[in-house]
Image (cartoon, grey):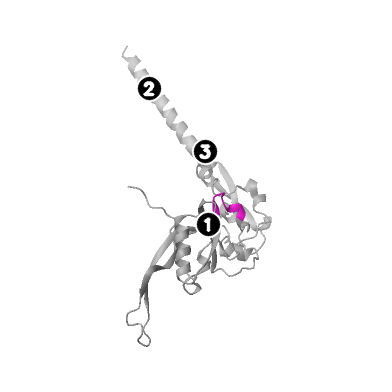
Amino acid sequence: MKGVPGLLIAVGLAIAGGLCNWFYMAQKSAELDLIQFVGVAEAGIKQGDTIQASNLTPIPIPLRYAQRLKEVAPTYNDISTVVGMTAYRDFQGGELVLTQDLKTPPNNDLKRDLGIDEVAIWINVDSRGFVPQFFSGGDEVSFIVAAAGGHQTSNASQPGQMIEQSTEVIGPFYILALGNRRGTAERAKASGMSQSSESVIAIRVKKVADKQLDEKAQLLLSRLRLSGNQALGLVMHSERKAKGP
């Protein structure tokens, strides 16, 4: 009987060893199994060029890493989705092509992007303190306006004395277009789009009634009227949202 426990232990160790070996081999198999993604050939691609099959090359990625990568990059089996696109930026040789690189400049019909309870209004932005290349459709912004009753005129009669004026920030609003541009400046340039004045910004505004805008939009338009429709300053908001407690 003394040999039976030893035999059982040996069998158990053999099973455990077999399982460990199976897991090890499965892991190695996942590393050795490769999925090919669309990469850029050694010569690279210049901004504005039409992407050809010769500009692309397969980049093999181990299966264990490829599953998540499929969510953000096309596989080489889908190379047809890349060929014929216009490169909106320079691509370096060996670079992986991402899905976001395939986005074309958005449709310029603003009405299609407006909900049934939304309208678009246009706001003039002060071009002296505004760099439009950093903005595109979908960005969240607020406007710097003169506060109601905020004029301070003390000593303003002295030559060269500036009149101070208090301000407030109204927003946020979402940009629909800058001039006639809705996507990034790079994509607009690559697509050959002729750009109009980008200091005139279309923003998305909610309606609370048939002919009444929401309180935030009404306040913005009221301050515009008080300032004589002067061009406004612009505040860019972060894409990162504050975490709750």
Q: How far apart are marks 1 and 2 (CA)?
A: 73 Å
In the rendered view, tell whether residue 143 sits above or below residue 156: above
What residue do we see at 32% from left, 82% from top? Answer: 155
Say whether residue 154 is visible.
Answer: yes
Residue that badge 3 annotates: 29
x and y percent of residue 90 in the render?
Answer: 58, 64
x and y percent of residue 128 in the render?
Answer: 48, 75
Element type where label 2 sits in the image: helix
x and y percent of residue 152 in the render?
Answer: 34, 75
In the rendered view, tell whether residue 236 sits above or below residue 118: below
Q: Distance between the residues labelled 3 and 2?
A: 28 Å
Residue 117 colored magenta? yes
Residues shaded magenta: 111-118
The foreground one among 216 and 15 is 216
Q: Looking at the image, is mark 3 or mark 1 nearer the viewer?
A: 1
Residue 95 colored magenta? no
Determine whether, in the image, residue 43 is placed left or right of residue 244: right
What is the three-letter code of the residue carrying label 1?
Arg
Residue that badge 1 annotates: 204
Q: Work out whether mark 3 precedes mark 1 in sequence or the reverse, and give the earlier one.
A: 3
> What is the number of the mark on residue 10?
2
Q: How far apart are marks 3 and 1 (CA)?
A: 51 Å
